Amino acid sequence: MNTLGHNFRLTTFGESHGLAVGGIIDGCPANIKLDFDAIEAELARRRGGNDETTQRQEPDKVDFLSGLLNGITLGTPIAFIIKNSDARPGDYECLREYCRPGHADFTYQARYGIHDHRGGGRSSGRETVARVVAGAISKQILKNQNINIAATVDSLAPQKPDDTRGGVISCRVDGLRAGIGNPVFGRLNAALAFAAMSIPSATAFEMGIGTAASTMTGSEYVDQWLPDGHTVTNHCGGIQGGISNGMPIEFRVHFHAAPTLPRPIDCLSSDGKISTIEVKGRHDLCHIHRLPVVVEAMTALTIIDFLNT
Amino acid sequence: MNTLGHNFRLTTFGESHGLAVGGIIDGCPANIKLDFDAIEAELARRRGGNDETTQRQEPDKVDFLSGLLNGITLGTPIAFIIKNSDARPGDYECLREYCRPGHADFTYQARYGIHDHRGGGRSSGRETVARVVAGAISKQILKNQNINIAATVDSLAPQKPDDTRGGVISCRVDGLRAGIGNPVFGRLNAALAFAAMSIPSATAFEMGIGTAASTMTGSEYVDQWLPDGHTVTNHCGGIQGGISNGMPIEFRVHFHAAPTLPRPIDCLSSDGKISTIEVKGRHDLCHIHRLPVVVEAMTALTIIDFLNT
Amino acid sequence: MNTLGHNFRLTTFGESHGLAVGGIIDGCPANIKLDFDAIEAELARRRGGNDETTQRQEPDKVDFLSGLLNGITLGTPIAFIIKNSDARPGDYECLREYCRPGHADFTYQARYGIHDHRGGGRSSGRETVARVVAGAISKQILKNQNINIAATVDSLAPQKPDDTRGGVISCRVDGLRAGIGNPVFGRLNAALAFAAMSIPSATAFEMGIGTAASTMTGSEYVDQWLPDGHTVTNHCGGIQGGISNGMPIEFRVHFHAAPTLPRPIDCLSSDGKISTIEVKGRHDLCHIHRLPVVVEAMTALTIIDFLNT
Amino acid sequence: MNTLGHNFRLTTFGESHGLAVGGIIDGCPANIKLDFDAIEAELARRRGGNDETTQRQEPDKVDFLSGLLNGITLGTPIAFIIKNSDARPGDYECLREYCRPGHADFTYQARYGIHDHRGGGRSSGRETVARVVAGAISKQILKNQNINIAATVDSLAPQKPDDTRGGVISCRVDGLRAGIGNPVFGRLNAALAFAAMSIPSATAFEMGIGTAASTMTGSEYVDQWLPDGHTVTNHCGGIQGGISNGMPIEFRVHFHAAPTLPRPIDCLSSDGKISTIEVKGRHDLCHIHRLPVVVEAMTALTIIDFLNT
């Protein structure tokens, strides 16, 4: 449940205001010299830094505990931890008996009969830091095979005073050869949808031209052949029948705005009382800028898992 | 790769113009009296019947080979087959050396070094008949728990002469209690996205209000509490943090038009020649009407798998 | 639960006196021409034929329903069925309310709240016919890679009048290169133990010298090096740290006697009454002779799964 | 590959002389108050302490990083690490180019093209410390359900001067109800065999009377009914058809002696030279005494995984 992948597997752990977050990568190929600077750079991308993004300032230093000898992968599990040095669990004391709207406090309580009220606990976006570490390693391995992944902010919801906003991330994979994917329940497009929708606040996934496809006739939609096996258009986003066709992989992911507003919010208590509470925790006005590196990480983890098959 | 689920598992097999399609259901609860009429009714829904849908006319008779004693489930694997009585593989002889545009002929060839040229082989929508059988059984079990699943055609692309068209299916699940789903890589919304995008010709998945969420501010998006734990709106589609919240599950799936047009099409040969070929095979002018029951089946299989955990 | 393997997967189905037994092989490499005569020959080995083995006489004809084009694998799921032409469920009518000793009637009833009283149902050795089909295909693929698997009857319990007997099967794999296996919970020896102990009536598994190792000192046990990387002895049976070392894989499997005796047996009713019942069903006096091909099949399925990783 | 279980999963990491060993437990039930003293006590059992056992002296302090709030499980992943405080990698410098006999140095090198020469790296028994932590938690949960697991040293190889020795561990589970296990590839006995054979130096697994069963007739072997559903004897070890029958689960595991002898040993270099080398590392004269708690841990992890289904 906290493991992604079959052959290149990431298992993550950690609550937002616990001691640490981190993960174990199992199935990483051996004899790869890791570029630790590249990992740090990816973490910096996730951390953001302008005024609109997170107010939480943590160095996100990664400690690798296993799986490496002199910085070279051994093929054994790579465990890593990132300490939550800037955790301030006390900020959330007022939420001990309340569930915020738009968050997972309520559903975790329903699922487990207990939930960590400190900043969303396991459901916080803080958890994605482990994905970014594993994604950075995956991207490095894919890059050695001339497979490149790039995601960017495609659009943002209108900015309004005192409020947070949603947006769209588009992602493109270049260099993936034709023939990657597995019918009928191992489709690459389905796995990418799963990976993207596993990111907190994702609301929609579009493969290729996505929603526009449903408004087209067959003549308009079908990608016509070029003699070299490529196609004139790439409406399908590089995947047919669940298998890559050699064109760039292209998809978009929609995200809703961060649900914690910078003002008092109406929370629900366990005995059915709705109270207006001002939560002190630090939150993103616009977390969308921090998401491209997360989308890239999830994409990289998905593709390397398929290639390892 | 051809298995869906962890605790309630469906493994399917079969090519469009081979001897049979079918599957094995493993993990079905014991002591359930199957309603075979309901299964046949679901197959009839999939088969369609008006002029715009499929020209292939098969009774789709299901033979159950195991897992039952006097129509009651034993808890052991339920194997079933549906013979391809109306297969006409000869119709596809002209495609032996060619790949059609918009189909998976090319990608299967790239993946396996061989492909079944007869009507798409394994990649044909014919394969979904096995999903519908398993989905019908799943729905019956869910209905016993007052969980109901209903999908409908939400919109269709404009009709044009001599052409096929895409469309949108919306789906709703009523009666699922709060607390179903598993963070962080076992999210119910991600699993539904995976299931939906595993349907041939799916191009986009929207959870709740889906793509519209990316254009909203937090204040506009967040579903506010009612004292009973329900919410005023259901923008999130009934799932928060990957776990159901007790509201109806709501999502939409976009599908592109059937890529086989009822006129000669430009196909690609293995030596890079593009030739215009008229394929005799029978095809849907609008397959969208046949998809609600498939969307329901994939939804039912996903939810029963989560409940069996 | 009825699926073996990760990359080369066999899912089986079927009760002893139901309509059919069979399975689906998923993950079989594409472009392999199957030798159907070899499959039939393996089934004949399993069927036995001398007086001491089974009294059930079935042709065990295999019908392949999918995954093949002109006898060549497509890479898609290979479904196959073997009809139970000689089933005589009526022979077991007397057992409808009783559980036999030494059989799984009682445990299936405890597990599922229902059980198929007809000849053991799913728990019957009849089910292994599907394993033998998949094993025959696996062995053919392994043989193409110069990997050969051979199992023989190592010893038999003393024969006594009017009784059944146990025995030991030894198995050897030649040609497996060093480096196959995965620490720490993906060990090849553990997977072989799992596969062997999954055969009905298996009671013990010995890797290499097996039980004798526990009576030795380190000096006596350790396999000393030869300069070519092989070892002087092969006490470990070709696997160290869960990974093959290039020596032959060697192990032994112990089996208890068939529990159905050719005389009246004391059975337990659901209300706690013990009655002496004479079951008409046909049973093996010595099923050990039929087991080498089953052990080979399970070994082949295990090794091909590791090689497909 | 480094993950055990499906519903209660343990993923472990760590090399013997790296920074730390540890693991992630995923699927642990929520709302359980952990007994940390009991965990420490289990680690002490594993550590041993008399002269014949390990010379390595480490406090084995466990740090829990996630999944707990005030010592109570949240249902989220429980990550834990144990630092290798007494690691002396320098002791193994002489082995950088050599593979020891009877160890996994050679097979890891063959598998990964690289291996950690420091004390066996990942293949060291040191790794079992993570299993013991997870096993201790599992046993606590099982004990709450009146399921108790106890393993003891059954026999030891004769002691000889200057040498190590093998032995046998027997294990018994009391309190497991009838009906636990899944045919045909999810058998409880097969899973126990897998778990036991996954312990370093295991060479054989015997279920119930084990190897003796192969020398018996059916009349001698079959466990006869008592009216309460129990049996007169327990030759089968409490499992029939892969499913528990309500009798105690009983099995034995054979282990070979520790392969590192307290004297110079003949090692193999990568260029095929055999040299006599004295390795400074600290090793067990008899590691058998440390194994009961490991066998119990693997048993507990297996059974809790089946119960969580």
Image (cartoon, coloured by chain):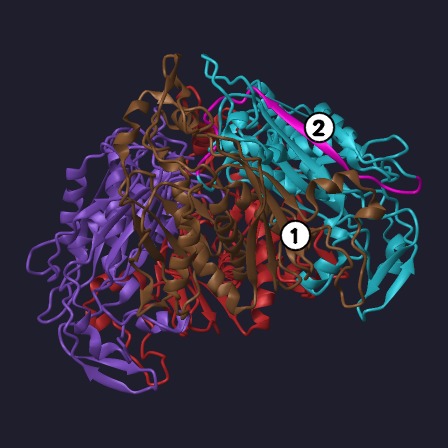
Chain colours: A purple, B red, C cyan, D brown
Query: Which amino acid type is shown beneath numbered disc 1?
Result: Pro
What segment is highlighted magenta in the picture?
C161-183
Q: Position of residue C222 (x, y in %)?
A: 51, 26
**Does dot 2 land on a helix, a strand or a loop?**
helix
Amino acid residing under circle 2: Ile
Residue C168 among those drawn in magenta: yes
Relative to B209, residue B11 above or below: above
Secondary structure beneath dot 1 equals: loop
Q: Between residues D283 and C130, which one lies in front from this camera angle? A: D283
Number of marks in picture:
2
Residue to which mark 1 is pinned: B77
Dominant secondary-structure state across the stretch colored magenta:
loop
Give neighbour class at mark 2: few <14, some 14-19, many 20+ (Cα, 10 Å). many
Which residue: 28% across, 74% down? Answer: B223
Q: Nearer the viewer, residue C86 or D127?
A: D127
Q: Residues within 10 Å of mark 1 (few under 14, many from 20)?
A: many
Residue D242 located left or right of residue B117: right
- Residue drawn 19% across the image and 81% down it: A277
In percent of the image, x 54 and y 44: which residue is there?
A: D196
How far apart, in angstroms, are the residues tagged by discs 2 and 1?
24 Å
| Chain containing the residue with disc 1 | B
Residue C135 lies in quadrant? top right
In the rendered structure, find residue C39 and report the number of the disc placed on it.
2
User: Horizontal and vertical percent for residue A182?
Assistant: 46, 39
Left or right: C272 as drawn, with respect to D203? right
